[in-house]
Image (cartoon, helix red, strand yellow):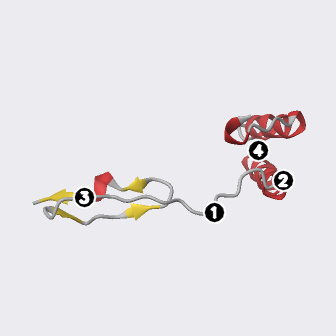
């Protein structure tokens, strides 16, 4: 079900099959995953519109970088 609370046994089966196929035929598995990705997008189960947030850092912090999925990239920060 995941974050969308959606249960689709057919889609779940396709994902299981694609996962198993990765061990024997990576190219075919990649095609299957692309098909699954398109199917999920077409279902429009989850469409984030924006992600609001604020990060506060000290004046001693440098090289602050923000990533939309990982947020503050802590391994890139330095402290004076």
**Residue placed under numbered mark 1 in the picture:** 49
Residue at 25 percent of width and 58 percent of height: 77
Residue at 78 percent of width and 34 percent of height: 16
Q: Position of residue 7 (x, y in %)?
A: 82, 35
How busy is the neighbourhood of tag 4: few (under 14 within 10 Å), some, or many (20 plus)? few
Asked if labels 3 and 4 touch by Cβ distance under 8 angstroms, the answer is: no
Q: Position of residue 6 (x, y in %)?
A: 79, 38
Q: Is residue 66 left or right of residue 47?
A: left
Decide which of tag 1 and tag 2 comes sooner along the chain: 2
**Residue placed under numbered mark 3 in the picture:** 77
Report the mark closest to the observer, 1 or 2.
1
Tag of residue 43: 2
Q: Which element type, helix, strand or loop, lies under badge 3?
A: loop
Decide which of tag 2 and tag 4 comes sooner along the chain: 4
Quadrant location of residue 25? top right
Decide which of tag 4 and tag 3 comes sooner along the chain: 4
């Amino acid at each position: 079900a995941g974050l969308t609370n959606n249960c689709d046994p057919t889609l779940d089966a396709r994902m299981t099959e694609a996962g198993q196929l990765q061990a024997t035929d990576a190219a075919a598995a990649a095609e299957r995953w692309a098909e699954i990705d398109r199917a999920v997008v077409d279902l429009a189960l989850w469409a984030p519109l924006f992600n609001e947030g604020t990060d506060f850092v000290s004046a001693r912090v440098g090289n602050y970088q923000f990533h939309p999925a990982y947020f503050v990239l802590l391994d890139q920060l330095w402290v004076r």
